[in-house]
Image: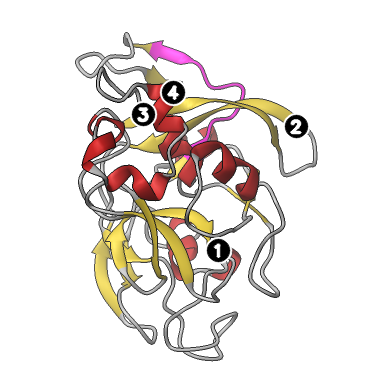
């Protein structure tokens, strides 16, 4: 089951054109793996802690050319210095039909520091504030959510309404005073999970959603929940369903 994040405006396609696209996230995690854990001097990794360069991230390879993408079993990144763990996506990976529905787009890789509001994260994600030498864009099919996706997914509630949530630093969402921002956010599943955004002051820090629901950052070799995110091709339509949990859309 996948869920709709929203209709995103002016997404850059692989050919340089731009169009509006529906963005999805897999409802369930496919497992807990490292964002990256390449050994020192392998690719962009400067230490045994991995690298926050998504373009050669070990997880990116799994999602876009490895076991998950090819709906098979293999080895997935797990811990420091290139360690791996067996992973089996033979029933949960991408089918050929699904891969044909996914649009190859340019994903923004802008970074920043952790204490920001959703709107501020949104701007940074599309900016050029990155650790020295890191790319600001990557072209591919399968990525992860951004911190801003998480921020804007909140509905808030009576005690703390949505406007107040959006005006509160995402790092501070762990405070009891604004707990509505977390408890009424459908992207929160009470577990650590990765985002796509690198931290700009370190070579291996990546933004992550904590188990209590606030936005923080972690070493890339940490093993957190992975929920793939994609953009749909413009020719994808609805075959059946009502878009509810009991009757989800079936795409064609």
Mark 1 secondary-structure assignment: helix
**Which corner quadrant of the image does residue 44 belong to?**
bottom right
| Residue on which the image places disc 3 | 154
Q: Position of residue 165 (x, y in %)?
A: 39, 31
Mark 4 secondary-structure assignment: helix
| Residue on which the image places disc 2 | 18
Foreground residue, 132 or 137?
Answer: 132
Whole-angstrom CA distance, mark 4 to mark 2, is 30 Å
Q: Residue at x 38, y 61 (%)?
A: 67
Could you tell me which quadrant the N terminus lies in? top left
Whether residue 69 is visible to the viewer of this picture, yes or no, is no
Q: Looking at the image, tell me whether mark 3 or mark 4 is earlier in sequence order.
A: 3
Whole-angstrom CA distance, mark 4 to mark 1, is 32 Å
Q: Are marks 4 and 2 in contact (CB under 8 Å)?
A: no
Q: Residue at x 54, y 30 (%)?
A: 232
Whole-angstrom CA distance, mark 1 to mark 3, is 26 Å
Foreground residue, 53 or 150?
Answer: 150
Q: Residue at x 41, y 78 (%)?
A: 37
Q: Looking at the image, tell me whether mark 1 or mark 3 is earlier in sequence order.
A: 1
Whether residue 31 is visible to the viewer of this picture, yes or no, is yes
Name the dominant secondary structure of the magenta segment: loop
Name above or below for residue 97 compared with residue 171: above
Picture disc at residue 54: 1
């Amino acid at each position: 089951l996948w869920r709709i994040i929203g209709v995103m405006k002016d997404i850059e396609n692989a050919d340089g054109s731009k169009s509006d696209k529906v963005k999805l996230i897999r409802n369930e995690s496919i497992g807990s793996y490292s964002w990256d854990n390449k050994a020192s001097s392998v690719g962009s990794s400067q230490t045994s802690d991995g690298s926050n360069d998504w373009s050669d991230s070990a997880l990116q390879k799994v999602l876009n050319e490895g076991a998950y993408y090819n709906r098979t079993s293999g080895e997935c990144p797990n811990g420091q210095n290139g360690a791996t763990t067996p992973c089996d996506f033979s029933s949960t990976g991408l089918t050929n039909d699904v891969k044909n529905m996914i649009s190859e787009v340019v994903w923004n890789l802008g970074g920043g520091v952790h204490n920001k509001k959703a709107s501020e994260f949104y701007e940074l994600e599309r900016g050029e504030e990155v650790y020295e030498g890191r790319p600001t864009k990557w072209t591919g099919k399968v990525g992860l959510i951004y911190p801003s996706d998480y921020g804007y997914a909140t509905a808030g509630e009576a005690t703390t309404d949505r406007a107040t949530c959006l005006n509160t630093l995402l790092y501070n969402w762990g405070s009891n005073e604004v707990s509505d921002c977390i408890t009424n956010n459908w992207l929160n599943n009470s577990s650590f999970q990765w985002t796509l955004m690198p931290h700009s002051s370190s070579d291996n820090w990546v933004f992550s959603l904590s188990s209590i629901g606030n936005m923080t950052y972690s070493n890339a070799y940490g093993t957190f929940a992975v929920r793939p995110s994609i953009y749909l091709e413009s020719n994808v339509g609805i075959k059946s369903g009502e878009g509810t949990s009991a009757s989800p859309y079936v795409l064609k």
